[in-house]
Amino acid sequence: MTETIERDSMQYDVVIVGAGPSGLSAAIKLKQLAEKNGREISVCVVEKGSEAGAHSLAGAIIDPISLNELIPDWKEKGAPLTRTVTKDRVLFLTEKKAFNLPVTPNFDNHANYIASLGEVVRWLAEQAENLGVEIYPGFAAAEVLYHEDGSVKGIATGNMGVGKDDEPTDSFQPGMELWAQQTIFAEGCRGSLSKQIIERFQLDQNSEPQTYGLGIKEIWEVPSEKHQPGLVMHSAGWPLDSKTYGGSFIYHFDENKVAVGFVVGLDYQNPYLSPFEE
């Protein structure tokens, strides 16, 4: 921008960046604690997606242990966890064969649920709003705001209606500044503001480097005779070579639907490898 844009501001007790499982759980817990202690606090959640859950794409196996603590009556409140895992299989694949491997504890999903993370997040958003949490979808947090002493003051949402030349158009709307006593960054993997905060305050100074992977998932509808509700399969091996970390998953959930996914560690050495084509 070639000129300073005046922005309106709003004050909250807590501002949370990201309406995913972590951000919404934090919002719900804060409201629960405030109610328990006879206090009233204002909690705001900003979400860049068009709605809560829009960017929660995982077909997931969910251990309900945290949900049991956060919302003990989640079944009565209609949480979208209906398909329990009935069987685990772990396979090592070659191009033409599949070998059964032992189901080790990290692959044992007994009492867990096969679910759509997007549906779970949408449900969590409803629970948060019922407690008085303000959720603003469609607003990306674009900037971290700081006090004069260097502490975090809050965030600013991005300007709307900016042209390709980075100048305001006729539909321009300036972003909003959201100030808070506490700001929680729950952006997920490699969030743009989280990266800035980590670098500014050296939050990773005494940490091992993180490991990243690229996951690809599709939802297939299969014939009923091939559908095995509750079956969870994981595999290693083909189509990856022995030097490349990764594997696949197949989760059979409701309505003849199967989540088919493939994950490749981003430290793969072959520059021509395309995880999607694999």
Image: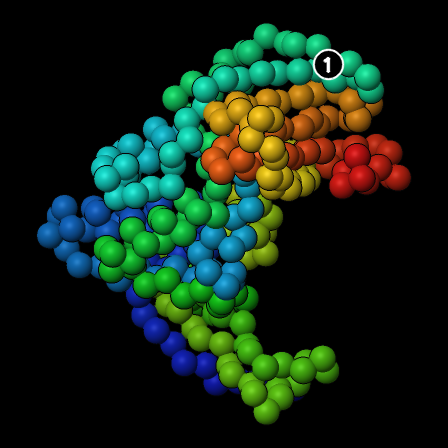
Task: Determine the secondary structure under disc 1.
Answer: strand
Q: Is residue 224 visible?
A: yes
Which residue is drawn at the image coordinates 73% and 37% (left, top)? Answer: 266
- In the shown orientation, is residue 151 left or right of residue 75? right
Residue beneath label 1, please?
Answer: 98
The picture places residue 187, in percent across and down from the top left corner, at 51, 51
- In the shown orientation, is residue 17 left or right of residue 246? left
Which residue is drawn at the image coordinates 29% and 32% (left, top)? Answer: 68
Q: Quadrant of the C terminus?
A: top right
Which residue is drawn at the image coordinates 67% and 28% (left, top)? Answer: 248
The picture places residue 237, in percent across and down from the top left corner, at 75, 20
The picture places residue 55, in percent across and down from the top left corner, at 54, 53
The picture places residue 182, in percent across and down from the top left corner, at 35, 56
The answer to which quarter of the image holds residue 220 is top right
**Furthest residue to the bottom?**
170
Position of residue 69 relative to residue 14, above or below, is: above
- In the shown orientation, is residue 2 left or right of residue 177? right
- In the shown orientation, is residue 271 left or right of residue 198? right
Position of residue 180 relative to residue 216, above or below, is: below
Q: Quadrant of the N terminus?
A: bottom right
Colour convention of the picture: rainbow
Crowding at dot 1, Cα within 10 Å, few <14 / some 14-19 / many 20+, comes out as some
The answer to which quarter of the image holds residue 219 is top right
Q: Is residue 186 visible?
A: no
Front-lying residue, 57 or 198: 57
Which residue is drawn at the image coordinates 38% and 41% (left, top)? Answer: 80
Q: Give, as a three-letter code, the residue at label 1.
A: Ala
